[in-house]
Image (tube, grey):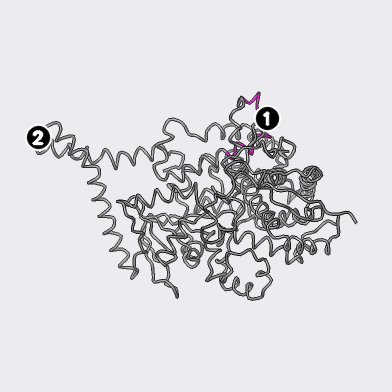
Amino acid sequence: MHPRHYRLRFAIDVLKNVFAPQILLAIVFSFCRFKLGSFSRVTVYALSVPATGALRTWYKDRRDRAALAALGAVPIPRVRGKWPGNLDIVLGFIQSLHDDYPMQFMDDLFEQYGCKTLNLRMLWEDQIWTIDDAHVKYMLTGPGFEWFNKGYYYWQERFESLLGNGIFNRDHEEWKAHRTIARPWFAKDRVSDFTIFDHHTNTTLGLMSTFSRENAAFDAQDLFARFTIDSASEFLFGNCLNTLHGSLPVAGRAKMGPKGSSIDDEFGTFAWAFEVDLRPSRLNTTRCLPSLLQDIQVQIARRTRIGKPWPLFELFKDKTSESTRIVQQWLQPIIQSALRQKPIQPRSETNGEEGTFLSHLTENTDDPETIGYQILNMLLAGRDTTASVLSFVVYFLAMFPDTCQRLRAEVLHAYGNDGLPSTEDMKELRYLRAVINETMRLFPPVPMNLRLSDHTAHAYPATRDTPRYAVPPNTVILYNTFLIQRRSDLWGADALEFRPERWLNPECAKSLAENPFMFHPFHAGPRLCLGQNFAYNEMSFFIIRMLQQIERFDLAPDAQPEGSLPPPRWKDGKGRQAIERIWPASSVTAFVKGGLWVRAIPARKD
């Protein structure tokens, strides 16, 4: 079934689970000429639904056990809640998304059951959660790569309006085709001259300087999101969105949005973007594009939290449709222009300019819809993940002045106050790479991902710590990068501490070489992020230029929007929540609630 037909999928589910049992029962009653009173008949019909559900669950469990026994595997440990269907676990998990430190609810469950893979068995359906790096490796590499995919129920269907048939929303042959087209572009390391980065970095640092001269707090997360989307849009299709020239959140007046801060202005974040007139003639879509994309992402995150029956809440209106329509209205003329200008021969054959990723796509396909979705996939990847990492880097630099001082010393030794970095010499800044990696270890930009097992039963290989666990067919598996990269048995007793120096230890390099799945912020296996080098180069270049001009950062809790600071009860909690001074959160990507408000102290001029 095509993922766009989510209403059809939901209707079939309702028919199968609600109406089919009653229809079958009515046929039986009619055939047997069995008569009941009106009240009794209604009662029997009503009870037929849960009874059929229980029978179906029993049959599936029995079938799965037989299949798993044939594999010589044991069932994954099940979480045992106090209420039927683990309803208390479901409610506790949902509540934790709003109130708790990220992944704390799941971390507590893993600790309680003493294992790294659990079956939450939510509402009588298997739902596997794992922080076992061996299990993740099995799913993302080798034969497991073909057996475990994203699945249209749990991924494609929910993301279809935003990602469409793009590279992040497809599996198997369709994904391979997209990958084949995109790989040559990113393999050429097209950011070696850093011209685009330098231009947008200077604009961003100019804004920071203005705030620092006035000793004013600013939302660094918002600035970084603008920097990365302006850079990515110019790099990908040569049309900069110029969001850095829009209105910025102001300390004391900014409001808390679902992803960062919001301003009551048409160029603000998504929460306020729909208070303006959305008619194309009245809307500056270029400036509002980041806001519209954020709105779509938040709606998709809600679908994920609701789970499989999410179409029930969008039966009459797709809640992403308005934002998606405006984004596509803005994007399609750019695509049509590129298609009209595509050369007769590929640029590689005519020795012409390399062009943009958009022009590269037009040389490989004439389908404007496919091109549009590919652009949006890459635009979102280039914006959200990199902005997330830069935000948490600055957070740690503010938290640890000694780290900031050491990193600044490395930068100034290499480039002075105004030297420009290049691809090759940036690789020599080992402490810079250590700071970036340690930040991504504690706050990976994509904290969690998922796979769906195919129609046959599989078994994870046994390890030193775990038996041969069985995975039932058609089961969703969520693997938690956030918790894997904080495991003390992988990273040591200080796993929860921010300590970049660990990356300079040869033992760390040895451990990573032996087990690369202990650290996979850019994913792993055949779906390893194509833009990994692009992201490292962009982040490294920006941090170097930033520390040439800024001596240190101070957190500005007085500027945080109301409700965005960590709740007092975290002080008595376990792990990092007891020391965190911002409220980390995640939807698809990690972010700071209410924004990362800081004050920048400018470097002294010698």
Pick the front one: 223 or 59: 223
* Residue 541 drawn at (x, y percent): 76, 55
- Residue 182: x and y in percent read 63, 51
Q: Quadrant of residue 49?
A: top left
- The residue carrying pointer 1 sits among few (fewer than 14), some (14 to 19) or many (20 or more) residues within 10 Å by Cα, namely some
Does any portion of residue 252 appear in the rendered image? yes
Q: Earlier in the sequence, mark 2 or mark 1?
A: 2
In the rendered structure, the answer to whether residue 598 lies left or right of residue 486 reads right
**10 Å neighbourhood of mark 2: few (<14), some, or many (≥20)?**
few
**To which residue does mark 1 refer?**
284
Q: Secondary structure at mark 1?
A: loop
Q: Secondary structure at mark 2?
A: loop
Q: How far across and how far down the image is residue 65, in percent?
A: 29, 62
User: Which numbered marker is on residue 543?
Assistant: none
Q: Is residue 567 above or below residue 257?
A: below
Q: What is the chief secondary structure element of the magenta stretch?
A: helix
Q: Is residue 287 magenta?
A: yes
Report which quarter residue 438 is drawn in: bottom right
Residue receiving disc 2? 35
Quarter of the figure with the C terminus? bottom right
- Amino acid, disc 2: Lys
- Residue visible at 31% across and 68% down in the picture: 70
Which residue range is magenta in the image?
Answer: 279-294
User: Which residue is found at the position 25% from the left and 55% from the top?
Assistant: 59
